[in-house]
Image (cartoon, rainbow, N blue to C red):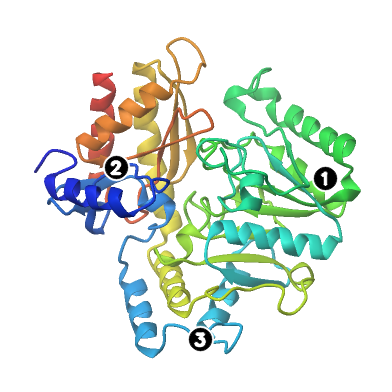
Amino acid sequence: VTAIPGPKSQELWARKQATVANGVGAVLPVFAKRAGGGVLEDVDGNSFIDFGSGIAVASVGNSAEAVVRRATAQLADFTHTCAMVTPYEPYVEVCELLAELTPGDHAKKSALFNSGAEAVENAVKVARAYTKRTAVVVFDHGYHGRTNLTMALTSKNMPYKNGFGPFAPEVYRVPVAYPYRWLTGPENCAREAADQAIEQITKQIGADNVAAIIIEPVLGEGGFIEPAKGFLPAIANFAKENGIVFVADEIQSGFCRTGQWFACEDENIVPDVITTAKGIAGGLPLAAVTGRAEIMDAAHAGGLGGTYGGNPVACAAALGSIETMRELDLNAKARRIGEVMKPRLAAMAEKYDIIGEVRGRGAMIAIELVQSGTKEPNPQATGALAKACHQEGLLVLTTGTYGNVLRFLPPLVIGEDLLNEGLDIIEAAFATL
């Protein structure tokens, strides 16, 4: 109903610029007033179809009934005691559900934290405590957070790492199976990438020195890259054979996002440790490290925790979020979102040769944009396309190591009418390029 951003958002943006650090940017400088059902309304009364979900956080919606009900009840009882001082039942209940839902039927334990980066840091801590080793192996195009250790683990320099070093030592990066960009073709990708990664670990680091191998089963900030089939099992098997803790970073891909509870289930991967956050608590800050009981118990008492880790209100929200996922079968809804989106995006790819690839699973879908007739990344077109979508009322996010991927993360509760309307906006935006 106004220009984007509208006058009230512009006024708030000026206030933000005066008091909020410039390093805290914004994809779209409109200020949210309310959100739900796949729609975000700003302070000027403009409505946006939400294909971002707060970066895969609001999977159950922005104010799911069970999340609000449980969190409100907990707010009325108490907001905080510190789980390390006097614990409370919701913390235990979340850990019980994580033991039930995560892959594998072995004994599991969890520790709760505030953010994905914090979860990854603590996964490294328990892996080092368990193995008595120091080296950590990560992959090209991987993203694991913005803290000092997780910046070291993260592949992409801008905007995550540039100027913020020096970084934590004993972090080593190896190739990942990126089918679209594998030089000898996608059919060779899994085997060759696994061979290269294992050779580098063996020759350059020494498998006996590696505490953990950490990988996102679908690489998020790297561009929603699905490693070629066979790659993840090969790396997981190598880890098992060499006493290395295999960590699945499911912070963006977990909790029904790909049409399964966790993306690693697609190839029947049972990680030793799994990190979760984002979609776990319906928008409240909560993260978890869940792993084999003997690994999680390797850290000494008092070695894991934090003042706010496993906050009772956030735990209550997580119980409501998981309740919603089960009651609405959001795995099935995520698969249906993929069934609607991928054919329409594939049809656009037939029409517009700057779409190099359509990829993803469930409600974690992306298109990679390239220069016409090549595989040369096209971040300019990606940015222009996102801006055109924003102007027409569709919130989309860009991503990718080369800044040339448009990613789609709609709430799993979105209606198909809104989903198709959003796809109409994307198609119309391509026509303007």
Q: Nearer the viewer, residue 355 or 88?
A: 88
Q: Quadrant of residue 1?
A: top left
Q: Which residue is under mark 2?
A: 28
Question: Mark 1 or mark 2, which is nearer the start of the sequence?
Answer: 2
Q: Residue at x 28, y 43 (%)?
A: 419
Label 1 crowding class (10 Å Cα cut-off): few <14, some 14-19, many 20+? some
Question: Mark 3 or mark 2, which is nearer the start of the sequence?
Answer: 2
Quadrant location of the C terminus in the rendered image: top left
What whole-number distance in Å separates the C-alpha atoms at marks 3 and 1? 43 Å
Q: Is residue 414 visible?
A: no
Q: Which residue is under mark 3?
A: 81
Is the residue 186 above or below the residue 101 in the image?
Answer: above
For the residue marked with disc 3, what is the amino acid?
A: Thr
Element type at marker 2? loop
Tag nearer the camera, 2 or 1: 2
Q: Which residue is under mark 1?
A: 238
User: Residue farthest to the left?
Assistant: 1
Element type at marker 3? loop
The picture places residue 269, in percent across and down from the top left corner, at 68, 51
Identify the disc placed on residue 146.
none
The picture places residue 138, in percent across and down from the top left corner, at 70, 43
The picture places residue 340, in percent across and down from the top left corner, at 35, 40
Q: Is residue 232 left or right of residue 398?
A: right
Q: Residue at x 40, y 46 (%)?
A: 409
Q: Is residue 367 visible?
A: yes
Do the CB atoms of the residues marked 3 and 1 lie less than 8 Å apart? Answer: no
